[in-house]
Amino acid sequence: MSSPPAIPARPKLAPGVRLHHDATRQAWVLLAPERVVELEGPAREIVQRCDGRHAPDQIIDALAALYTAARAEIAADVTDLLAELAARRLIV
């Protein structure tokens, strides 16, 4: 059994993946080779910060300044999304 991929220290979109606003869906999506991943809720705010310059803690701090939710809740959401994106090879 393999372990889940680690969250990158400074996550960025994988080569060939880009953030795009889909006018037809009226939603933000990640476009990747042969797939489209629709982003829901604050996922766009998280993905926008996956630029290779921000560590996960910096992303959490930035979102904590934007939203009224508890930092622990924001940290859990950010960590879960980054782990999922890493597992799907959408961030490196």
Image: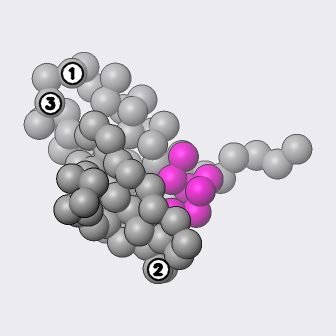
Residue occupied by mark 1: 69
- The residue sitting at 11% across, 37% down in the picture is 66
Q: Is residue 8 magenta?
A: no
Q: Report the coloring of the rendering.
A: one colour
Residue occupied by mark 3: 67
- Expressed as whole percent of the image width and height from the top left, the position of residue 79 reads 45, 39
User: In this rendering, is residue 74 above or below 32?
Assistant: above
Mark 1 crowd level (few <14, some 14–19, many ≥20, 10 Å Cα) = few
- Decide if residue 88 is on the left or right side of residue 61: right
Front residue of 18 and 7: 18
Q: Which element carries disc 3, helix, strand or loop?
A: loop
Q: Which element carries disc 2, helix, strand or loop?
A: loop
If you read the primary sequence from the N terminus, does the residue marked by circle 3 or circle 2 appear first?
A: 2
In the picture as drawn, the residue positioned furthest to the front comes out as 24
| Residue 12 in view here | yes
Q: Which element carries disc 1, helix, strand or loop?
A: loop
- The residue sitting at 54% across, 46% down in the picture is 84
Residue occupied by mark 2: 16
